[in-house]
Amino acid sequence: MKKIGIGVVGLGMGANVLPINRVDDSVLEVRGICDIDERKLEGLAQEFHIRFVTTDYSELLEEEEIEVIAIFSPDHLHGEQAIRALEAGKHVICTKPMVTRMEEAEKICQLVKTKNLKFLVGQTMRYEPQFASVKVLVEEGQLGDVILAETHYVHDMRPVFAFTPWRLTAPQDFMYGGVCHPVDVLRWFLGDVDEVFALGNRSGLTPAYPLLENFLLTLRFKNGVIARILGAYGIVHPPIPMMGLSLFGTKGSVIADFTDKEGGRVKVVFDKFEIKSPWETMFPPEMEGAFGHGMTVLRYLRHFEECLLENKTPIPDCVEGAKSIAVCYAAYQSIETGKPVKVRNDF
């Protein structure tokens, strides 16, 4: 029985939420959608039997049959829209980045706590099978103690600007909108970051884009592990997977990667074996839904459903999201000062 209503704002990647209406054993149901494209609204409403459509976000919040707001609007709107949803008493699912300003992260964490609401940050890489498989290896102790880590998220953004022009006109901040991906993945495995040193530059490949596009971050975690991040978005399309993770432990090392159109892999070497040949597992691409993230979004929707029904804390929640934003904020401070910067973790 469908008994928990969802309202979706932003029907780009947000369209991936709508198929939950066809999952018979889910209590979730999309009951309202909001977008500036009226033609898209009407078409998707008819396809997924959604009774309420609007181009006005305020109207979505006023619907009593909607208990959850799913935010998939442009990055710079996430904070304001999440805060308004929480103030209206709605649970929230928000795609990454949670926000683009520290003040908004603070306010969201405060509201979630005082109003006793659920908040999930849609960090898709936590729900990709290859990275989840590495998490199992780490939790089982198969790699021993992690000593060193690195990750990357790289993307030639020039073709993306063509079908999402808001990224130029807003403009999208790639530290928050891009680097938050590898930051969140590392925090998932290694916990809180103590300090960060960062560098950044602007490529000029897209003259109309005014902000820094490429970033190198070196992180020290509170547990002593050191790691590095490459976040590059003003580049010619690189011949490497879009997302990659490497963990080096006392009992073994592993790499995992992801490309939406090609799938991914996990390669692991165990020190306990005399022959250090890597074990490799391939993960086929999941091309369902907008931008190939249909299955990933479905996974975190089912997780959020479980949290609502059993009163659990979503993973990652707003506090985890705020800590990732704090790393990005500290990275900008480091770029400006040329020095390592301590990262805030009290939210």
Image (tube, rainbow, N blue to C red):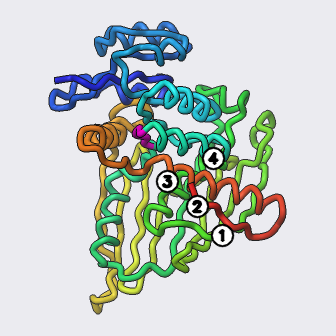
Viewport quadrant of the N terminus: top left
Where residue 209 appears, as percent x and y from the top left, is: 76, 37
| Neighbourhood count class around disc 3 (C-alpha, 10 Å): few under 14, some 14–19, many 20 upward | many
The disc placed on residue 176 is 4
Disc 1 marks which residue? 195
Task: Indicate the quadrant where residue 64 lies.
Answer: top left
Q: Is residue 344 above or below residue 5?
A: below
Q: Give the residue pinned by disc 3.
A: 320
Among all residues in the image, which is located at the extreme right?
337
Q: Earlier in the sequence, mark 4 or mark 2?
A: 4
**With respect to residue 38, does 273 lie above or below?**
below
Would you call the spot at circle 1 few (<14 residues within 10 Å), some (14-19), or many (20 or more)?
many
Amino acid beneath label 3: Glu
Classify the position of the C terminus by image quarter. bottom right
Measure the alpha-carbon separation of dots 3 and 4: 14 Å
Mark carried by residue 345 = 2
Quadrant of res 28: top left
Residue 130 spot, x, y in % from top left:
34, 58
**What's the amino acid at mark 2?**
Asn
Q: In this view of the protein, which residue sits in the foreground, 149 or 283?
A: 149
Secondary element at tag 2: loop
First in residue order: circle 1 vs circle 3: 1
Disc 4: CA contacts within 10 A as few (<14), some (14-19) or many (>=20): many
Q: Is there a contact, CB below 8 Å, between mark 1 and mark 3?
A: no
Q: Which residues are magenta?
A: 116-120
Mark 1 and mark 2: span between their CA atoms? 11 Å
